Amino acid sequence: MTIQEATDLIRFSPDPAKAVWLELGAGGGTFTRALARLLRQGSTIYAVDRQPLRLEPVVDGVRIHGMQADFESEALPVPPADGLLMANALHYVRHPEAFLERLFPLLQTRHSLLIVEYELTQGNPWVPYPLDFARLTRLAEQVGYQTIRKLGERPSLYGPHPLYAALIESSTT
């Protein structure tokens, strides 16, 4: 997927203020760069992956801090984030409800979750714990979110199940 395709998939209107985002499972950085295109200059993304990251320190005026860590088991030394991006990463988490609840201390009271997953209901070796949009919606509700919307879909290069992007927002009250 190109950076432009990733940007189009996750396109949303972020808070116009400078923001701090946390990305878990950054991989090669395609979605890191896509998110940087959408955030205001001067914002910061903390990109985390188990593998060493090779990311530019600044993309479109957004600072990128790469961290090698296992986001499921290691403490992450990051400031409270305004948003969390997980692109093709949540499907590796066996217990996503408990995992998301553990992330709350890393997030501001008012925050957004930007999730990219496959519209898939049965696991396989590459997507062991799938989260189709219906399951993600139930998961979000279980952990206390009230606003979730699908941003877009695109065909997958790896099979018949499309990728989708969803924006989950914490309550404004």
Image (cartoon, rainbow, N blue to C red):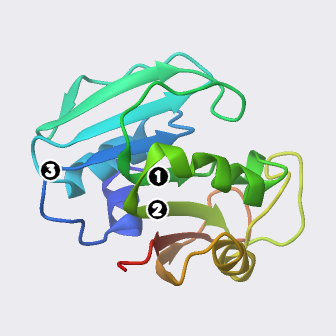
Disc 1 residue type (three-letter): Leu
Q: Position of residue 59 (x, y in %)?
A: 20, 35
Q: Is residue 35 left or right of residue 23?
A: left
Label 1: how many residues lie within 10 Å, few (<14), some (14-19) or many (20+)?
many
Task: Decide which of tag 3 and tag 2 comes sooner along the chain.
Answer: 3
Tag 2's secondary structure?
strand
Mark 3, residues whose alpha carbon is within 10 Å: few (<14), some, or many (≥20)?
some
Mark 2 surroundings: few (<14), some (14-19) or many (≥20) residues within 10 A: many
Q: Nearer the viewer, mark 3 or mark 2?
A: 3
Q: CA distance from mark 1 to mark 3?
A: 16 Å
Give, as a three-letter code, the residue at label 2.
Answer: Leu
Badge number at residue 18: 3
Tell me the amino acid under the disc marked 3.
Lys
Q: Residue at x 30, y 71 (%)?
A: 12
Distance from the alpha carbon under mark 3 to that under mark 2: 17 Å
Residue identified by numbered label 1: 85
List x then y, in percent, for residue 138.
Answer: 72, 80
Q: Is residue 61 above or below residue 152?
A: above
User: Which residue in the rendered view is the most extreme toward the front?
Assistant: 173
Mark 3 falls on what kind of element? Answer: loop
